Each structure stands twice: as structure tokens, then as C-alpha cells.
Amino acid sequence: MLLCASLPDKLPAQIGCLGCHLVALIQPWATCGRAIAADSTVLRARGGVWHQKHREAGEVPHTSIDTQAHWTKSGWHGWVYGWKLHLITVVAGVWIPLAAELTPANADDGTEAAKLIWMGKWELPPDIRYMLGDQHYNTPLLRAVCTLKGWWLVATHRGKRPRNDVGREVRRIFHKLRSLAIENFNEHFKSIFDGHAQVHMRGLVGVRRFALGCVFVYQLALLYRHEYLGLRGSDLNLGLKAFLKAA
């Protein structure tokens, strides 16, 4: 029981170390730019939802409510009560998770990404030059962290830019690459681990153990398929769901 309780605190460092090893082994940037992408994906809490009026009053109307979860508004799903899995992945032909953390759903994306980069107990691959994100990552804090790391932060901007903006078309390419990488990875990941349904446990410790454990298992599957099955490039991702279901 004690091991299970302490496991979530160890998983982010293990994910970071294995992610670096996979990059060194697979060489995903051999034929493309050295970029990473940040995003969060929402996981629905188990049981009922805790409406804001009840939360503010300190009332828990039903025992099925996970009081450690929180609300967020998703562009795809509207308001969701649950959790956020924050991810940083490689932008390349193969999707490799490099860092991950699980928080209540109201956590700020930019702040959590900055923590993953700067405060993690591991090193991200030294070859990174660009970090890609949507408008939630276009923050002074994350921009400062990326500058200290020697990276370019490319994140969408709120509102309209001038028509004579010379960097517009270049950023359009970066944003497309980001979408193809991490948004497709999020869908792929949630499809494999049944992430579209409610999670099967309650409480931050349990959900964090589940979500981060799934990321680590995904990395181990990539390692096995590369080392023992001899797969390369995008073939590492193909058929991964069936592979893990059969394991």
C-alpha cells in the first residue's frame, strides 16, 4: 500500500529519463527539426460532478463526487469536471512522450508546462530548439523559461495580427506540425487507455498513478517494439493499441 502511494511521485522522473533514452535510441529528429510540443488533455472524474454553487457552500450532495477534481472548459467538450494530463512530446514521425504530470482540471497549462521544463528532476533532450503550443502556452513565464533553456517558444496569439507580419507563414507551419504531433498523440493515447470515459478511481493519488502509469507503459511499449521487433519511425505507433491489448 505504501509503495502504491509513493509511486506517483516517482513516475514523472522515470517518464523523463525514459523519454530521453528513447530519443537517443530512436533518433526521431534525424530527418526533421528538433521541436517538442506541449498540451493538456482532459480526463473525466469518476462519479458525479461537484457544481460550483455546492463547492462554494462546502456542500457535497452525493458520495460519488470526487472532491479533489475540478472544472475546466474544453474547446472540444465544453465544461468538464475532472483532471488534466499535461504532456510534452516529440514533434516528429514517431510520438514520444518526454514529460507528464496530472493535476486537477483547473490548473493553468502554461504554468504546468513551465514546471515540467524547469522544475522537473530530469533533463530533457539537449537537442531541443523549439517548443510549440497553443494560446494557453503564450505566457511571459513560459517564454522566460524557454529563453533560459535556449529554445524558441512558438505559440498561437490571442486576437488578430497585422497583415504585414513577416513571420505569419512560418508560424502557420509550426502550428500545423504541433497539431499533427501532440493532438493526434492525445487522441491515440486516450483511445488506447480508455481515456474518453470516466477514470476508474477517485482522488489525486489514484488518478495520478493511473494516468502517469499509462504514459510510462506507452514508453515501454515503444522501447520494446524498437529493440525487439525492429520497428522504426512511424511504424512504432502503428498497431500499438492492439499490441498493448494483447500484452
Image (cartoon, helix red, strand yellow):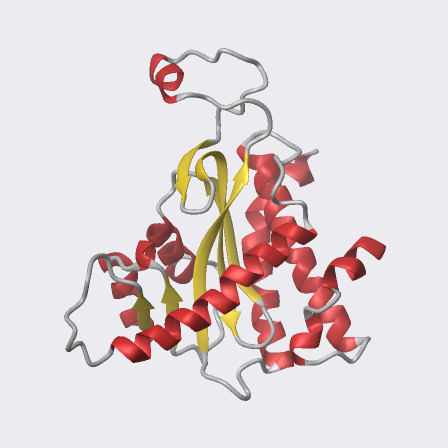
Query: How far from the left and from the top, in percent, is residue 50?
Result: 46, 21
Query: How far from the left and from the top, in percent, is residue 54?
Result: 39, 15
Query: How far from the left and from the top, in percent, is residue 49?
Result: 50, 24
148 left or right of 24? Answer: left
At a point 62% along the width and 45% down the height, the residue shown is 195
Residue 232 visible, this orientation: yes
Query: How far from the left and from the top, in percent, is residue 104?
Result: 45, 37
At a point 68% along the width and 49% down the height, the residue shown is 193
Is residue 108 positioned above or below 144 on the image? Answer: above
Is residue 227 positioned above or below 9 on the image? Answer: below
Q: Quadrant of residue 65?
A: top right
At a point 70% along the width and 75% down the height, the residue shown is 235
Question: What is the quadrant of the C terminus in the image?
Answer: bottom right
Residue 7 visible, this orientation: no
Q: Quick one: which residue is furthest to the right in this view?
A: 246
Q: Quick one: which residue is furthest to the bottom in this view?
A: 31
Viewer-closest of 94 and 146: 94
Q: Quadrant of residue 107?
A: top left
Question: What is the quadrant of the N terminus in the image?
Answer: top right
